[in-house]
Image (cartoon, grey):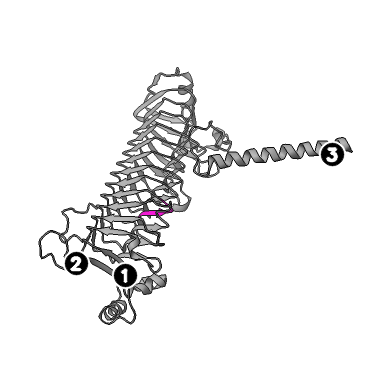
Amino acid sequence: MRRLSLLSRGVLAAGLLAATSIGQTEQQLGSNADLSTAPRVTIDRPKPTFMLRERDPRVHGLKPFQALVDAAEPGSILKPPPGTYAGPVEINKPLTIDGGGQVVIDAGDKGSVMVLNASHSVLRGLRLTGSGDSHDTDDSCLDVRGHHNLIEHVVADNCLFGIDLKQVNHSTVRHNKVRSKNLELGVRGDGLRLWYSNDNLIEGNEIIDSRDMVAWYSHRNRFVENLGRRSRYSIHFMFANDNVVDRNRFYDNAVGVYFMYTEGGAATNNIISHATGATGMGIGFKEASGTLIENNEIIYCGIGIGSDLSPFQPDSTIEIRNNRLAFNGIAIQFNSETGGNYLRDNLFEGNLTQVSYGGRSDNPTKNFWAGNYWDDYQGFDRDGDGQGDNPHELYAYADQIWIDLPMARFFRSSPVLELLDFLERLAPFSAPDLILRDEKPRFFKPERSAVS
């Protein structure tokens, strides 16, 4: 019994020591730990193997592209003869594969078309088509797992996921065209996905009729001159810090750019248009901090810029400057008032509502407004300095009805609400809420035009 008691104490002590070590490790890492240098891990479920007879008959008579890959020497340049080949393809050695725009690889609607596990490789001028439709195995046109790779001028169509980067660093994805399968929006795969992937360049790609372009746990990536159409999120960042979105064009998506649980980053010189519908939003924040929004055209959206608990980190700010917010339902909406937003030199014109709060603003001075142009400014510039003589103050009158009762938003701009708003301004039944005060509003409209 004594030996059993000693053994039990030893097991208990070892368990407590292990638990303490785990707790200390978690405390050292923290929730924002950078795991980019952590060892590579297996991140996929085992992918099933499909026999040729299980694939679409259109690929039954095609030559397998895998045979060409297997025969190529590591580090060599593979220029396959023009034609259509059968997938799937797995690349486990450095290669340059140049299809010259005349090579098609078709997986016959099963599994993933191509998997690139190697680093320092180049894929160019290929068309990848016919992935499966399983979300469990992330069926895609192109899975990328290596580093320092270049993927360019690749067409990926009839795919669940388009180009999928997992634990990929220092790679370039440019001038590719991605289209999803003809499925309902919610069950399509992502056109381009980055997962734990850092320091990559995403440039000049077309993501059309897909679901999202996403970056999860991925830092310091640059998204430059991409085109996104008819998808859900043009770009969705989650726990992804210091990413830059510059000179992109996003049309007819539900949401343009969304920063969720992020720190740092910037959206500059983008055109975001026609983000409409019940959740239509040009640029959105959810518990984000330290972001720069500058020189964007945000037009014809349900909400131009939407903010929820942002900036989130204490003493952090969000800079919104020199943007054009025009012809939106609501130009800027704050769902919760944390303060720390600096809005300078923006242009507000043609919006049904310039600025609103999800609830009553207890302190409108928490945010800083200066030098913005307001098309509804009522004042003069007697001294000719280009600034209004009086501050621009925005109050909520009848607006408070549909802010407090979202269902009443359907009747916004209707004759009855317009009349009620007029009467409220003429003789308020109660003191209206002050939404904002711009001490130095711009008097003349800046010279810039929308690009639609």
**Rendered location of residue 285, percent (x, y):** 39, 54
| Element type where label 1 sits in the image | strand
Location of residue 329 by image quarter? bottom left
Viewer-proximal residue, 254 or 389? 389
Q: Quickly name the residue at label 1.
A: 434
Whether residue 279 is visible here, answered yes or no, is: yes
**Rendered location of residue 284, percent (x, y):** 38, 54
Amino acid type of the residue tagged 2 in the rendering? Asn
Amino acid type of the residue tagged 1 in the rendering? Leu
**Rendered location of residue 185, percent (x, y):** 44, 52
Whether residue 184 is visible here, answered yes or no, is: no
What's the CA distance linking mark 2 and mark 3? 83 Å
Amino acid type of the residue tagged 3 in the rendering? Ser
Residue 32 located within the stretch drawn in magenta: no
Q: Quickly name the residue at label 3.
A: 5
Q: Please report the residue visible at 39 percent of the width from the left and 25 percent of the height from the top.
A: 97
Q: Earlier in the sequence, mark 1 or mark 3?
A: 3
| Element type where label 3 sits in the image | helix
Give the mark count.
3
Which residues are drawn in magenta?
283-288
| Element type where label 2 sits in the image | loop
In the figure, 158 relative to 426: above or below? Answer: above
In the figure, 287 relative to 26: above or below? Answer: below
